[in-house]
Amino acid sequence: MDCPAGRTGPGGGGALAAAAGPAQAGQWVNGGVYQYQSTCRSVGDSRVASGTYETYYCQSQSPGWLLRGYVN
């Protein structure tokens, strides 16, 4: 199940894998896989606040949650 920015989720925790490569403006990028939805959201919120992403979502996968961000 997808988790749009601003939705609440259970738990907290660290990244299972980090795989953010160079990106150009105007595209969706992978921002890492996190064990918990709440951690995925926290990282996404931080990247929006810093201006790295315009928006993001957390997508459920096995295992964990994949962060997808839209680069400004």
Image (cartoon, rainbow, N blue to C red):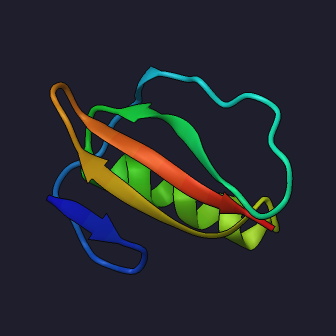
Q: Is residue 38 above or below residue 6?
A: above
Foreground pick, 33 / 14? 33
Q: In this figure, what is the number of numbered marks?
A: 0
Residue 40 in percent (x, y) is at: 41, 49
Q: To which quarter of the image does residue 63 belong? A: top left
Q: Is residue 4 left or right of residue 25?
A: left
Foreground pick, 3 / 39? 3
Q: Is residue 56 left or right of residue 21?
A: left
| Residue with the most extreme bottom position | 6
Q: Is residue 43 visible?
A: no
| Quadrant location of the C terminus in the rendered image | bottom right
Q: Is residue 19 above or below residue 66?
A: above
| Residue at image coords 54%, 58% | 44
| Residue at image coords 28%, 66% | 3
| Residue at image coords 80%, 65% | 50
Q: Is residue 31 visible?
A: yes
Residue 47 in percent (x, y) is at: 68, 59
| Residue at image coords 14%, 58% | 1
Q: To which quarter of the image does residue 65 belong? A: top left
